[in-house]
Image (tube, helix red, strand yellow):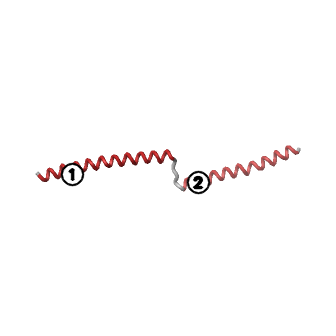
Amino acid sequence: MLEQFFQAVSEQLRAPKADFEKNLRAWLSDTLDRMDIVSRDTLLRQEKQLAEAKQAINVLKQQVEALEKVLLERKEV
């Protein structure tokens, strides 16, 4: 009988703990979502894409400069 009592009390204590953990996880998840936090993998992938875009822009700038040079040379002739 005493064992049943302790088991019943133990079960009653587990329920609020599970509810608390569930609520805490939900709150943390919601808070992190609002903070716009990204994973390390996402950050690294975006940094790589940015570096590639910067490199492509530099190539395009060089091409534009070369074309401008050609146009200026033709105007002078």
Q: What residue type is labelled 1?
A: Glu
The label shown at residue 32 is none
State the residue at coordinates (82%, 45%): 7
Assess disc 2: are there few (<14), some (14-19) or many (≥20) residues with their C-alpha within 10 Å of its C-alpha: few
The image position of residue 54, as x and y in percent, is: 36, 49
State the residue at coordinates (69%, 52%): 20
N-terminal of the pair, mark 1 or mark 2, is: 2
Assess disc 1: are there few (<14), some (14-19) or many (≥20) residues with their C-alpha within 10 Å of its C-alpha: few
- Which part of the image, by quadrant, shows the N terminus? top right
Judged from the image, the secondary structure of the residue bearing numbered disc 2 is helix
The image position of residue 5, as x and y in percent, is: 85, 47
The image position of residue 23, as x and y in percent, is: 66, 53
Q: How many marks?
A: 2
Judged from the image, the secondary structure of the residue bearing numbered disc 1 is helix
Depth check: give the residue in front, 6 or 58. 58
**Separation of residues labelled 1 and 2 (CA atoms):** 53 Å
State the residue at coordinates (75%, 48%): 14
Q: Does residue 52 appear left or right of residue 3 in this picture?
A: left
Q: Does residue 35 appear left or right of residue 51 in this picture?
A: right
Q: Name the residue under label 1.
A: 68
Q: Nearer the viewer, mark 1 or mark 2?
A: 1
Residue 48 found in image quarter: top left
State the residue at coordinates (40%, 48%): 50
Q: What residue type is labelled 2?
A: Asp
**C-beta proximity under 8 Å, tags 1 and 2:** no
Residue found at the very far right of the displayed protein = 1
Q: Name the residue under label 2.
A: 30
Residue found at the very far left of the displayed protein = 77
